[in-house]
Amino acid sequence: MIKVTNLHKHFGRLEVLRGIDCRIAPQEVVVVIGPSGSGKSTFLRCLNLLEEPTAGEVVVDGVCLTDPKTNINEIRQEVGMVFQRFNLFPHKTALENITLAPLRVRRMSRAQAREVAYNLLAKVGLSDKADVYPDQLSGGQQQRVAIARALAMRPKIMLFDEPTSALDPEMVGEVLAVMKDLAREGMTMVVVTHEMGFAREVGDRVLFMDEGKILEEGAPGQIFSRPGNERLQSFLSKIL
Amino acid sequence: MQIAIHSLPVLLLGAGKTLEITALAVSIGCILGLIGGLSRLSKNRLLRFLGTCYVDFFRGTPLLVQIVIVYFGIPQVMRSFQDYLVYAYGITPFFDNIPIFVAAVISCSLNSGAYIAEIFRAGVQSIEKGQTEAARSLGMTNAQAMRYVILPQAFKRVIPPLGNEFIAMMKDTSLLSVIGFEELFRRGQLIVGATYQAFAIYLSVAFIYLVMTLSFSRLVDYLERRLKTGD
């Protein structure tokens, strides 16, 4: 589903990604962990070209993103993204947030877009919040609307960039629950997170990144109980 | 006092002209400003350059100079060009001068547009980057993200500075008196010329400007408060 080859990203002289190779299979849930500044988010953002890779190749669903001839807007329709800070559109209601892209990008009819949106709001447990503006929703509710907004495009892949890091602790659970449902339904997911419980329970595979490289990867059981790499050991000892 | 009251109707007619020209200039200025502001934010280097030239020229030179260039300067060039056409192709001359009202609208609109371009640019840039990223991540083009996500939010934020621009333009239209456009200040000048009552008349003129600017700024405050909800 996703194939990343020798991915490099520099910000000026700062090397954030220093040669990432990675393959992600359909329906796989890959959790990316690592200390802050390790390049996790940048890596994720390269998967839908919110960051332009400096070198290397990213192939998503058979389309090479790094090829200049690729229409990036088309592939982004297939790759949903959920942000740390939700980034809901504040001038639109929850429902309008969800219907905007299906209406304008997918050219869905208004009735159809609304039906999709209502179904998704039900799925994330917010049926009663359709006509509410984002500033009247709690952080957890906003993030669930944001997930619904991404799902409304019927993406094949979902990218999550620290989706619970900006939430109060008591709201983390409701967002993770939605993500677990998605994983169970077979969505291909790449999740950058500090929620080790989620990684262990839902992840098919865990990637440990530090200083712009993938230092270790494997099944969650293996990563958490028998970490081989020294940096991974010290990282885990600090957060578990 | 007597003279001030007597000249009030004449002055108020001038005030009407002042409002009319200001409203026209700021409205056209909004269109020019949107084009100019978006050009300055464009990825296209030529557009960015043209936008910068426009803004720099009209903000960097006095409105007074711009007015005389439009009213006296440009028609002169056009007449010379017409003379050439008459000489070379034998056309009948048709152009004489730009009507004073048109010159007033053109010069004030161009000037206002340059300031409004900067207002729009700042408004667009004040919207968090995450908004564009969210829109783009859903597959919207840059133009769609601008139209459906960024501009609607930016418009709310530019209302107070646009109100300021309107008030500033209202006062600056007094400069149109140099080309004889009969707005409020020019009317005042004409009355003073006839009556020699400089203090009373100019004080009345100032008072009428004050009433207009204050009521307009109240209106902007009100609009701003109403639009705050849902931001």
Image (cartoon, grey):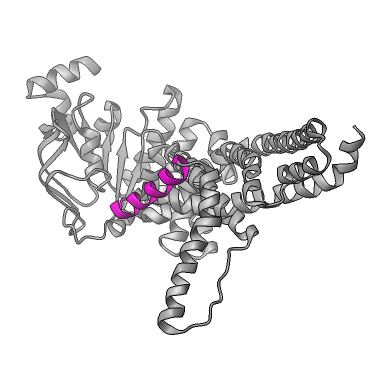
In the rendered view, tell whether residue A208 sits above or below residue B189: above
Report if residue B104 lies within the magenta region: no
**Residue B19 horizontal side relative to residue A54, left or right:** right
Location of residue B213 (image quadrant): top right
What is the magenta range? B43-60
**Residue A206 horizontal side relative to residue B176, left or right:** left
Q: Nearer the viewer, residue A220 or A52?
A: A52
Q: Position of residue B75 (x, y in %)?
A: 52, 62
Q: Position of residue B3 (x, y in %)?
A: 89, 37
Report if residue B49 lies within the magenta region: yes
Q: Nearer the viewer, residue A8 or A121?
A: A8
Q: Position of residue B67 (x, y in %)?
A: 55, 50
> Does residue B189 appear anywhere in the picture?
yes
> Does residue B29 appear anywhere in the picture?
no
In the rendered view, tell whether residue B73 sits above or below residue A171: below
Q: Residue at x 57, y 46 (%)?
A: A130
